[in-house]
Amino acid sequence: MSVVTLTVNGQEVAVPAGTSLMGAIKAAGASVPALCHLEGLTPVGACRLCLVEQEGTGRLFPACTTEASEGMAIATHTPELQAYRRMAVELFFAEGNHVCAFCVANGACELQNVATEVGMDHSRYPYRYPQRQVDASHPQFTIDHHRCILCTRCVRVCDEIEGAHVWDVASRGGSCSIIAGLDQPWGEVEACTSCGKCVEVCPTGAIVRREDTTAEKRPHRNWPELLRSAREQHVWLNQ
């Protein structure tokens, strides 16, 4: 196995060739925030919170989708990166309707956690208060598009792990949204197996179980990694 050596915040670390910068950062004992990234799912670099800087160049790279290379020197928490991440999180809150006190994911929300991590106490940008849909047509689950941040975790877990491909992304720009089936009510999509994986990986309170009320959602976000590992290695927890 070939190995590449790089530095993360001045600390030298060696990782197997093909490892992402996210993996190298983890190997160095550091971390960067992320909302779209989840172990077990294909990285897409959508949320841009994991951007890191190549020291001495000012170049930024998404850590989840960039492969570590020999001699690379990256910084994960420069003042510019911290300011950028706070701005990005503020825009997430301004773009949707995220009222934590009335959310089923309150206290178990990754967007809420990242806001705390970057030191956000308010948004400097005007709230858009979008008029979106709440789809409660499924007998077990509900999707509230007001709280969706378009991380596409639901799309990837349904496609890559469950193999149902119920979810997809429609339109562009400010009209971009997650759709079920051919833009149908979720409950009418025959491909849905009601497995609930989309609920488990959703980082906010956008996709929830119908019986959950305020602050009751407690997802299991390590499931995709466990399921993918089990399928690839043919090793299951009950064996």
Image (cartoon, rainbow, N blue to C red):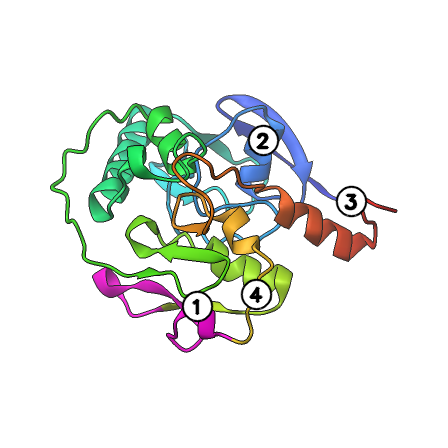
Residue 135, numbered label: none
Residue 1, numbered label: 3
Report which residue position mark 4 lands on: 159
| Closer to the eye: label 3 or 1 | 1
Estimate the spatial distance between the alpha carbons at disc 1 and disc 2, rounded to whole Å. 37 Å
Estimate the spatial distance between the alpha carbons at disc 4 and disc 2, rounded to whole Å. 27 Å
Describe residue 50's horizontal placement relative to residue 1 as left or right.
left
Residue 26, numbered label: 2
Helix, strand or loop at mark 4: helix
Helix, strand or loop at mark 1: helix
Describe residue 36's horizontal placement relative to residue 89 as left or right.
right
Can residue 12 be seen here? The reply is yes
Q: Is residue 214 magenta?
A: no
Give amino acid for label 1.
Trp
Q: Earlier in the sequence, mark 3 or mark 1?
A: 3
Estimate the spatial distance between the alpha carbons at disc 1 and disc 4, rounded to whole Å. 16 Å
Camera-nearest residue between 67 and 234: 234
Q: Disc 4, disc 2: CB below 8 Å?
A: no
Report which residue position mark 1 lands on: 186
Helix, strand or loop at mark 3: loop
Describe residue 39's horizontal placement relative to residue 139 as left or right.
right
Q: Earlier in the sequence, mark 3 or mark 2?
A: 3
Q: Residues within 10 Å of mark 2 (few under 14, many from 20)?
A: some
Provide the residue span drawn in magenta. 170-189
